[in-house]
């Protein structure tokens, strides 16, 4: 493919570009005391091959034909870059940085080859490309590794292109024909490294200047010339939003917020597995990255809540808040992305597949054993209390079984792969099984937790009713209870409400099964309203009851979102984040400012209820969409892009740019 001709740029841009070129030339001719890491390379503007070391020689045409055939037959763009080394970075880090700098789309693959050390890495987004991790590994093993071992630099790219084409066609990866080449092409180049390079021909300045100007416009034009998207804000972050319509900015910011929240949740789960195995010390860098990302995400959620509140901002203020939201989400993702490669090396599932599989099988057996007990607990809740009491976990046992069924298939496939030595494929299925078992455990834990909360609410309710009725007696005796005017009417209204609630709850208790948590919530709210009129009486008791109901509702909403996050948008996530923030602040204030803590707990309860409602609405909508999957791994966010083994892949530690990554260092 050949990009369009560059359009004319403003004089200021040309001057800035030429200044940058002259700076580069000066650095090339000036003595350098030590080598340093360079920026990721700008890919060639003339096609999909970038050869900085003349590795291809007269075989460049053959590589171009193979790459063109891959696109013509399969509509897949393969970019190949040859460099001497990776500037002190890992091959995968360098490949990922190069793909990001050049704005490669979600369905593009970049193959980066370091000729001096015979290293390479490939990049892609699992679930958005046409390949699974196992398929990419098969191409690497059968079509890239053999020619690379013989210094067949052209054969490496040709093998990759033919291998990817065969995979899409459902055919075996073909064995490449190998033509051995130079062991270190460009290995003796000394440009810019010593006194002999002090004089650079003027022609070089002209050429470099022209290429720099061309590269300057290339990324802007890429969106017009690509056959695949140049990446959304979720993959690349935004460098500016001034030209985006406010409504579109609002929509895209919501998607980015939901994606960042998913990335943080997935990273939290993966980090928990790493800590369990390697300890807190080994996981410290990733814990720090996750803490940073959570802080940025929390601030983004605060902004979203302010945007959604009942006090609308003007357009300029709204745009500024949305841009800050985008920036914070992008920064959170960037911080997680920075640690993704090192985190992979810590877990090293590809090298440690048998042990990881054994651990996953043990966790599976534990979760499976607990599922039966959770079913009995849920049955007891339904028999003893009214239906709304168990509603938050009504489907948890069946959903846990669904996750375990998915895990069973993954573990079986992983066992087969381990037995045949296909550790990369085994790691793929182990990772997905780990996530599924983890969600099953979350669903089971929720049943046990709710049973405890219902029992505690029932005990607290008796005391709450007694205290409220005592305060009612005191309120009726106040002079203002029968006084005329607004003050008297307000007190009378509060008394009447408390009387209605307490009488209604007493009747529910005597009539049969009821919902203790909801009853405690209603009594607490009526009592708190009464206290505002007669003065605080039993605020500590009110706070304890409000904290229990808020904790129960917030926990239920959090569990629901975690296990259905593949379908849930930013509104529900925002309300939940705010509920958790208010609940945490309430706990902090409980010892010193009880009244403020009570208000915070009540706000948390209300926001959590909104979050639950919005999340359930999202799931219902998701299930009615064409292709919507109302249950399973996609709904739970365990895999992205499709069923595992058919284009989907398990999500991993990292931000939006790496959580669905494919491949690794070779």
Image (tube, rainbow, N blue to C red):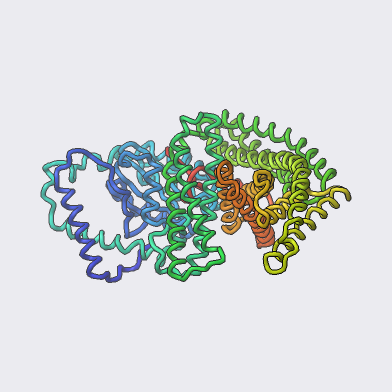
- Toward the right, the furthest residue is 511
Query: Closest to the observer: 241 or 58?
Result: 241
Q: Is residue 629 visible?
A: no
Q: On the image, which quarter does residue 204 sit in?
A: bottom left
Q: Is residue 225 above or below residue 23?
A: below
Q: Position of residue 279 (x, y in %)?
A: 51, 29
Tell me: residue 283, above or below residue 113: above
Q: Residue at x 34, y 68 (%)?
A: 4
User: Which residue is found at the position 46% from the left and 38% from the top?
Assistant: 286
Give how far across and how far down residue 206 sits, in percent: 18, 60
x and y percentages locating residue 275 in the rendered image: 53, 32
Is residue 371 shown to the viewer in this render? yes
Q: Which residue is located at x 57 percent, y 29 percent? A: 354
Quadrant where the C terminus is found in the figure: top left
Instruction: Residue at the far front: name it.
Output: 479
The structure residue drawn at horizontal position 71% and vertical position 51%, both measured from the top left corner, is 524
The N terminus, quarter of image: bottom left
How many discs mark residues in the rendered view? Answer: 0
Residue 579 in the image: state x and y as whole percent.
59, 51
Residue 650 or residue 422, whichever sits in front:
650
Instruction: Decide which of 7, 631 is in the foreground and name it.
Output: 631
The answer to whether 379 is drawn above or below residue 324 in the figure is: above
State left or right for residue 536 relative to residue 517: left
Q: 83 or 442, which lies in front?
A: 442
In this image, 301 relative to 15: left or right?
right
């Amino acid at each position: 493919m050949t990009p369009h001709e560059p359009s004319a740029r403003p004089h200021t841009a040309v001057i800035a570009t030429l200044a940058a070129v002259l700076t580069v030339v000066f650095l090339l001719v000036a003595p350098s005391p030590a080598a340093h890491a360079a920026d990721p390379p700008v890919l060639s503007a003339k096609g999909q091959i970038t050869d900085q070391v003349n590795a291809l020689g007269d075989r460049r045409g053959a590589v171009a034909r193979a790459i063109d055939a891959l696109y013509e037959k399969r509509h897949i763009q393969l970019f190949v870059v040859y460099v001497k080394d990776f500037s002190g970075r890992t091959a995968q880090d360098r490949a990922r940085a190069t793909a990001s700098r050049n704005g490669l789309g979600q369905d593009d693959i970049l193959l980066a080859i370091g000729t001096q050390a015979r290293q390479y890495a490939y990049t892609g987004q699992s679930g958005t490309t046409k390949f699974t991790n196992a398929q990419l590994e098969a191409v690497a093993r059968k079509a890239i590794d053999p020619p690379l071992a013989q210094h067949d630099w052209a054969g490496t790219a040709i093998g990759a292109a033919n291998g990817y084409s065969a995979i899409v066609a459902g055919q075996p990866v073909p064995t490449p024909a190998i033509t051995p080449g130079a062991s270190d092409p460009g290995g003796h180049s000394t440009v810019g490294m010593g006194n002999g390079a002090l004089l650079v021909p003027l022609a070089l300045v002209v050429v470099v200047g022209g290429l720099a100007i061309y590269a300057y416009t290339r990324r802007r034009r890429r969106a017009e010339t690509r056959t695949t998207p140049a990446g959304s804000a979720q993959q690349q972050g935004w460098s500016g939003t001034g030209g985006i319509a406010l409504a579109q900015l609002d929509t895209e910011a919501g998607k980015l917020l939901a994606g960042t929240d998913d990335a943080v949740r997935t990273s939290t789960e993966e980090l928990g597995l790493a800590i369990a195995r390697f300890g807190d010390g080994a996981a410290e860098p990733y814990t720090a990255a996750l803490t940073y990302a959570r802080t940025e995400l929390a601030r983004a959620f605060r902004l979203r809540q302010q945007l959604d509140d009942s006090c609308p901002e003007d357009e300029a203020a709204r745009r500024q808040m949305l841009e800050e939201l985008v920036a914070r989400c992008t920064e959170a993702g960037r911080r997680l992305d920075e640690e993704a490669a090192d985190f992979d090396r810590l877990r090293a599932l590809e090298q440690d597949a048998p042990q990881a599989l054994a651990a996953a099988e043990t966790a599976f057996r534990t979760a499976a054993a607990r599922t039966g007990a959770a079913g009995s607990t849920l049955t007891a809740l339904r028999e003893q209390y009214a239906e709304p009491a168990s509603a938050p976990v009504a489907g948890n046992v069946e959903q846990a079984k669904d996750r375990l069924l998915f895990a069973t298939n993954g573990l079986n496939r992983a066992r087969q792969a381990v037995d045949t030595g296909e550790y990369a494929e085994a790691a793929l299925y182990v990772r997905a099984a780990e996530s599924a078992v983890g969600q099953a455990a979350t669903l089971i834990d929720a049943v046990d937790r709710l049973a405890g909360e219902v029992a505690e609410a029932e005990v607290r309710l008796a005391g709450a009713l007694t205290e409220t009725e005592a305060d009612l007696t005191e309120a009726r005796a106040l002079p203002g209870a029968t006084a005329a005017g607004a003050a008297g009417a307000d007190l009378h209204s509060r008394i009447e409400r408390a009387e209605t609630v307490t009488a209604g709850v007493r009747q529910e208790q005597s009539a049969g099964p009821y919902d203790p948590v909801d009853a405690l919530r209603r009594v607490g709210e009526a009592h708190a309203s009464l206290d505002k009129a007669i003065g605080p009486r039993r605020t500590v008791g009110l706070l304890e009851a409000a904290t229990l109901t808020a904790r129960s509702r917030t926990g239920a909403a959090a569990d629901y979102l975690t296990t259905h996050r593949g379908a849930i948008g930013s509104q529900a996530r925002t309300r939940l984040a705010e509920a958790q923030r208010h609940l945490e602040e309430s706990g902090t204030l409980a010892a010193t400012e009880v009244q403020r803590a009570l208000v915070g707990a009540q706000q948390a309860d209300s926001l959590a209820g909104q979050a639950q409602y919005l999340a359930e609405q999202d799931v219902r909508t998701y299930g009615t969409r064409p292709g919507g999957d109302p249950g399973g791994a996609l709904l739970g966010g365990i895999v992205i892009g499709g069923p595992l083994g058919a284009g989907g892949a398990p999500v991993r530690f990292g931000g939006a740019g790496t959580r669905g990554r494919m491949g690794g260092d070779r």
